[in-house]
Image: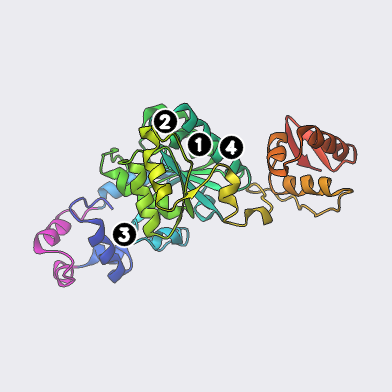
Amino acid sequence: MRLEKISIKQKNLLLDQFISPEVIYSLSPEALAKTKFLDQKTVNYLCQVRSLDQAKQDLTYMKKNNIQLIPRGDPRFPESLANLYMPPLAIYAKGDLTLLHAPLTIGIIGSRNPTVAGEKYAKLFSHSLSSVGVTIVSGLADGIDGRSHWGSVNEPGSTIGVLGSGIDICYPRVNQKLFELMAEKALIITEFNLGEKPLPYHFPQRNRIISGLSQGVLVIEARKKSGSLITVNHALEQGKNIYVIPGDISGANWAGGNQLLKEGAKLVTDPKDILEDYIIFDQPVIKHHETAQLTALKMATPEEQLLFDLIRKGYRTIDELVACSELPINRVNSLLTMMEIEEIIMIKYGNIVLI
């Protein structure tokens, strides 16, 4: 991992031929030269730096800080990343590793200096999607990334942050609180080694992992020349769905997204516009280790049945039920009161739960 003078392409070629780092480490200079992946100068470099001292230090630090190293070929390594044109050799991970195999993941990307509207949409869409079990993937940068993580970190779907630095470095510093919360309740990953700084060329490389982990990518505020469009290009090459929230035609921050719409990206104005592509409405969402078994009860009226089904699928607030059922708020309140009297639901601190 720390062999800076050997490219990721060369490392992947070596792994493809020799299966494991242990085998590569044991190869003689002659065997390495015969691969024809490395010139003699690179072979000499590899043999000169063949030491496990740094690896032992890294492992000590990782054990102390609950950091996992998941190499390519490990069952925990996501298949979606293994199938990339240039897959990471391994990923460092801290947090809930089950999120690496989440059933539905949506990347959210956009400006680091968003407008008030962009910030609002990022939090609204990430919260709404994650509340029904969608895992949000973003880059833990300032702006749209940070808002998207904040909107989803406490929801059933949770969130994954992909860093452009070592996992021991929080960048930008303004996200320190979010970084710590995600390490505890969600997931942070990176392909960069411990101590590696957030160098400019790391971020385009990082973006292929965001798109690789995501089944679709939502663009919220992107200039015509921005890192967000690099992520979109990766996503298109990987055959992923592209979604765009339209914006002010005179605003430079929205120009990149508006151009994507001209080129065929799906225009979205509501989280349901994304969800409809994944049949999410047919799947009840159970948060992490929740074991309650929800039974499809027969309600007294079609409207009660509609609300019951929405609650079972993860909609937990009156605002969400009004938006999804398209019933008037006074009618929703009346139906919920009846369902509470019938002991079908319980309303606790504004959240509606089935009994």
Q: Amino acid at mark 2?
A: Pro
Disc nearer the start of the sequence (4/2): 2
Q: Mark 1 belongs to which amino acid?
A: Ala
Q: Earlier in the sequence, mark 1 or mark 3?
A: 3
- In what element is the residue under mark 2? loop
> Helix, strand, or loop for circle 1?
helix
Q: Depth-wise, is mark 4 or mark 2 nearer the camera?
A: 2
Crowding around mark 3 (Cα neighbors within 10 Å: few <14, some 14 to 19, many 20+) is: some
Chief SS of the magenta region: helix
Q: How is the image coloured?
A: rainbow
Q: Earlier in the sequence, mark 2 or mark 1?
A: 2
- Identified at 52% across, 38% down, the residue is 184
175 horizontally vs 8: left or right: right
Q: Which element type, helix, strand or loop, lies under badge 4?
A: loop
Q: Looking at the picture, does residue 354 appear above or below residue 170?
A: below
Using the image, tell me which numbered label, if any, was put on residue 154: 4
Read off the residue under disc 1.
122
Residue 7 relative to residue 322: left or right: left
Which percent across, then down, holds residue 301? Answer: 87, 48
Q: Badge 3 is on which residue?
A: 86
To which residue does mark 2 refer?
A: 114
Residue under the image location 45 percent in, 57 percent down = 240
Question: Residue 37 vs residue 80: left or right?
Answer: left
Q: Tell me where residue 53 appears, x and y as whole percent.
A: 26, 48
